[in-house]
Image (cartoon, helix red, strand yellow):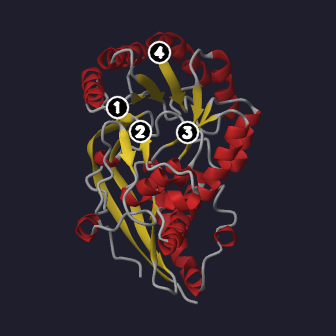
Amino acid sequence: MSWALGWAAYRMPFTRPVATARGRLAFRAGAILWLAGPDGVRGLGEVAPLPDLAERELGRALGLLEELRGEIERGEPDLERLLAGWRDGMPAGRALRAALETALLDARARQAGLPLARWLSAEARTAVPVNAVVTAPSIEAAADEARGAVAAGFRTVKLKVGVAETEAAEVERVAAVREAIGSGVRLRLDANGGWTSEQAVRLLRRLAVYEIDLVEQPVPAGDLEGLAAVRRRAPVAVAADEAVTGPETARRILELEAADALVLKLPVTGGIASAREIAELAVERGCAVIVTSAFEAGVGLAAALHLAAALPGLSPASGLATAGLLAATLTDESLLPRRGCLCLPAGPGLGVSIDRAALDRWRQGREGR
């Protein structure tokens, strides 16, 4: 029972400046893969390491995929065995596992004639509330972005922080965004691990007056003790984001009581199965769950959307309103939100198909066949 595997790498620009604490993002690199079983039903996946690691880790992931091609095509892949030792320790392995698993699940849901979210859960929703993302580095531009998001119907706005030159400017930028959105809209901050524990506590004490809903990853991902210290000492709820690399790290975060919420990014957690396990652990401990994208193109974004729709106990908004940040989704479906909600695509599986013209335009190198 042979399978057929193929992929195409891409590299495309962001449509506007994306400033993060780890630097400004200009391009997104990744790969779309497809996997067809003996019945000819094809599933899609996306290899999308975190953007600041993508150029390096994508090459590693595709190199590993080439090595594993023969074994994958001989039969339905056993991902746990094939990627043993890679999923938890290497960003490339986690991103590749997420992509292969997504393709397998997409194919299974298509065979069943069900949207992937419904295949995962009979209680799945058909739409998910999402937050806007404000990425402009300047105070004025950030306020304008936030104001536009509220006008478009968003009820939660997330501001990338850790990008200002001084702490005073950081506070001024947050204040400007809060003023722009008014008091009835939730404001989240995302530090992308850009602060030390002491700096985070100091800043969050100053920023709390602006009614901050929560702050994502205030300290580096590996500093779980520092994350716990921020949660104990700062007057703002804390979410672990890049630190959530799998069920084991999630357990450690929960044991340390280091977070009020866990953020799930499929290329970071290693896929949907791992993310669902993490969500179950979080719910057991009374911890919120937020599904966000990693600025993937349409295939990866659709996978995250189906996960969010299938999970119980989600926060008021998921971080999935990111399709408009890229030059193309590489899918025929736009995946753009309306009035602060993102609807699942129609059709079985992921509900998306490859836009060949867009993929050809942004493809890097030859397709893997």
Q: Earlier in the sequence, mark 1 or mark 2?
A: 2
Given the image, on which type of amino acid does mark 4 rest? Glu
Residue count near mark 4 (Cα–Cα under 10 Å), binned few <14, some 14–19, many ≥20: some
Residue 105 versus residue 212 in the image, above or below: below
Type of the residue with mark 1: Phe
Q: Amino acid at mark 2?
A: Val
Q: Which residue is mark 1?
A: 154
Q: Which residue is mark 4?
A: 211
Q: Is residue 44 placed above or below 15 in the rendered structure?
A: below
Q: Residue at x 40, y 60 (%)?
A: 299
Q: Amino acid at mark 3?
A: Leu
Label 3 sits on a secondary structure element that is loop
The reply to whether dot 3 and dot 1 touch (C-beta < 8 Å) is: no
- Residue contact between numbered discs 1 and 2, judged by CB atoms under 8 Å: yes
Q: Which image quarter holds the C terminus?
A: bottom left
Q: CB of mark 3 within 8 Å of CB of mark 4?
A: no
